[in-house]
Amino acid sequence: MARSWRWIAGLALAAMLLAACSQGGTGAGTEGSGGDQDSNQLTVIGPWSGAEMEQFLPVLEEAERRLGITIQYQTQRYEDLAQVLPAQFEAGQAPADVIFMWDWWVKEHAQDAVDLKDIWEPEAGAFRMPAAEAGGQVVAVPYALTVKPGFWYRKSFFAEHGLEVPATWDEFVALLQRLAEIEGVQAPVASGDGTGWPLSDVVEHFLIAFGGPDLQRDLIEGRIAWTDPKVQEVFRDRLVPVLEYFSDPMDWTQAVDLWWQGEYGLYFMGNWLTGLVDDPSDLGVFPLPGARGMVAATDYVFVPRHSPRAEKAKQLVAFLISREGMELRARQGGKLSGRNDVPAEAHPAVDQEVARLLEGAELLPDLDDAIGGDWQRTFWDQLKLLWVEPGQWQGVLERLEQERGR
């Protein structure tokens, strides 16, 4: 079937405003009223471009066929949407009928979102992540997942050097020691950096593995201090002793290349790594032994109250979050199913290993993203210090606790 949707990549803010204004009366403040109510063309705004967009478009194409509609897809970053949407909503307009956006942002603008409770409740039990709720309404629903599963390695590199995936902490340490002895290896683990988040991902994985999923939640909610003995134990007994095997922080994309070339044996990264290497079939991944949870994130989707085609838009969202819709998205690769009733085998081979790690694991919010603000920047800076001066770990925890505002 010829594709009837069109993609407008990198839509400029001014152009989007102009397009929205040209739509004319859309029934400001009235759900599903006004404007082009009879049109079967929906507009969807999502953050994906390039390869990620190509993985999403087959889902929209199938939705067109099933719902008898045409869909126009536009790429727009969340940061840009956060700037333009309030003004449009204030004017009773919406740039699209279905929009992917941060859940916290939609909750803050709940008055401008259609209640999706009727399409969410029949599916909620199958989802790994909760819906965004505000004022007793479901204002946005989760879609596909990205996760940070653990340490990646090249299967060919492990085979060449007779290395095996560790099943215990002692085996993990022994693996690091063996990697350090391989000629040409600069360090057993590449430490990606940038704004600071790759290092924070490593630390969160240690906290979850050895402090348990509740420790991650308690730190996010401020129910436990960073200087608490439980946190100190993870740093003192697990993380700090092995930092000697990590490289100094480097640009995270450069780290991907150097690790892939064999200068490092392991690399901690999210599952989007599969799209950054030449041969994804050579990838293997393992969590720290004993880890019962992992950090996960999902894109949330909502229907603006000012869409003149809100009911059609809800039908599209219902398809996206259905088992069939989610399985179709999983088959495209790059994302994992947000539903637990889509089998790992539904994903491409490269994603199946990660999908199996989800089974039985608790999915947790990203710690520094959840806290955010100045504390997040302090966290990143302190971890850079920790990486180059591990002996300062107690001072790092004290600084983090001080910044948390106790």
Image: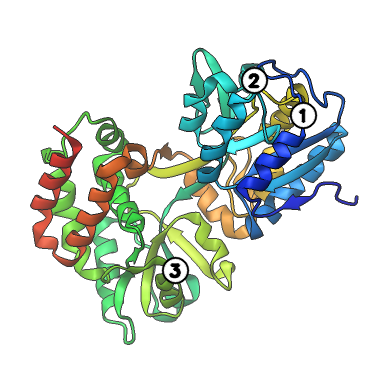
Amino acid of disc 1: Gly
Residue 75 visible in image: no
Q: Residue at x 30, y 43 (%)?
A: 208
Tag 3–tag 2 contact (CB < 8 Å): no
Tag 3–tag 1 contact (CB < 8 Å): no
Quarter of the rendering containing residue 191: bottom left
Which image quarter holds the C terminus? Answer: top left
N-terminal of the pair, mark 2 or mark 1, is 1
Residue 319, image x and y in percent?
73, 32
3 displayed left or right of 56: right
Residue 362, image x and y in percent?
41, 37
Q: CA distance from mark 3 to mark 1?
A: 45 Å
Please rate how many residues cluster around mark 3, counting C-alpha atoms within 10 Å: few if below 14, some from 14 to 19, many from 20. some
Residue on which the image places disc 2? 122
Residue 391, image x and y in percent?
9, 61
Residue on which the image places disc 3? 253
Select label 3 or label 2 by which is in front: 3
Q: CA distance from mark 3 to mark 2?
A: 41 Å
Residue closer to the observer: 59 or 78: 78
Residue on which the image places disc 1? 24
Residue 381, image x and y in percent?
23, 56
N-terminal of the pair, mark 3 or mark 2, is 2
Q: Residue at x 58, y 49 (%)?
A: 335
N-terminal of the pair, mark 3 or mark 1, is 1
Q: Residue at x 91, y 50 (%)?
A: 1
Quarter of the rendering containing residue 94: top right
Q: Which mark is residue 146?
A: none
